[in-house]
Image (spheres, rainbow, N blue to C red):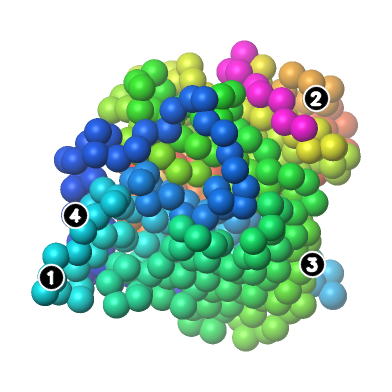
Amino acid sequence: MNRVARILRPAAAILALLAMQLGMALGAQSWRIARAPYRYVFPRDHFAHDAYRTEWWYFTGQLRGRDGRRYGFELTFFRIGIRPHPYRVEPGASAWRAAQLYSAHFAITDISDRKFFYAETLARDALGQGYASQRRLLVRVNGWSLRGNAATEPTMHLHASARGDSMDLSVVPEKPPAIEGPGGISRKGACPSCASHYYSFTRLRASGTLRVDGRREVVRGVAWMDHEYGSDELSPGQVGWDWFSIQLNDRREIMLYRMREKNGTTTPQSSGTIVARDGRPTYLSPRDFHITATGTWRSPHTHALYPSGWVVRVAGISEPLRVVPVLDDQELAGVGATYWEGAVRVFDARNGRPLGRGYVELTGYAGAISL
């Protein structure tokens, strides 16, 4: 069952398209490119990076209410540069003149009642509709917000609401930031600009409240955060990606992404990371993991055919992992780029023993995606 709150106005959708087209036309030469070696400096790198064309702060997690009800959630903030930074505001320019476009996606999976809700909003930086600070951890899009203190491992506060459903959570890192990729960059393809700077908080202690179907729930659980920024990351031959975040019960975490080409092959620069119990990350090349879909699901909304269920084998993990969606229908349709983003459970594929939980993101199955 899908219950959809649509906030995106047609004019804003057109603005988003124009902004993306303008960014593409200006090319990577007008924006800073993610290059190695890159040394992360925290807390500075938690903040916005306006010199890069695209950036996002991405949160997912699984929560439990006091009565045992279970939920998944996603809250993502996107920043898209319209004009390369630094930019000069001309005297007498319109107050509506924008240099940045902001978008945010919010979803709740009601695992217990098998319902899925999502909402979206989009704003320009003009007149304060959207904002991301380069001096502190603060992102706002039409009242939805991410706020954090100035610590290297900050306590972060998340807020979003739409048509009566809402989320107010505090998330606290239990491990230091895990750098995704050698040399401080995460490669997405062979071209010089096909890369991003990317780090994760792979285990966050989450607590707060959800309001779902008019019911207010006090919740606790475990969350994941990605922060990624770059310019011109994808190549023309790529159609999308399969991304996995897995939190094992033994307090290890796994991130995997498989970039997909138009001809059906996997981009050789796809990669992953294992994060040890002490927070130490280990890079995974495509040779170090194997993902096999075990089924499919066809969306009744877009008719897109997605893989659904996987067996994942990872070097350094003794068990083959069976990854199972908690709900088939977790598709976010019509949010600029339609994609599937869903909570999953993880089992030992040999004997069914529960091993953990996570989230999976599938893009490009309802049409090629571009950044």
Earlier-in-chain disc, 3 versus 4? 4
Residue visible at 63% across and 44% down in the picture: 200
Give the residue number, with chain letter if any, for mark 2: 317
Q: Tell me the tag on residue 91.
A: 1
State the image coordinates of residue 297 (x, y, percent, origin top left): 52, 44
State the image coordinates of residue 255 (x, y, percent, origin top left): 65, 35
Helix, strand or loop for disc 1? loop
Residue visible at 31% across and 59% down in the picture: 100
Residue sitting farthest toward the left = 92
Residue visible at 38% across and 28% down in the picture: 194
Earlier-in-chain disc, 2 versus 4? 4
Helix, strand or loop for disc 2? loop
Q: Tell me the tag on residue 18.
A: 4
Q: Nearer the viewer, mark 2 or mark 4?
A: 4
Earlier-in-chain disc, 1 versus 2? 1
Q: Which residues are magenta?
A: 280-287
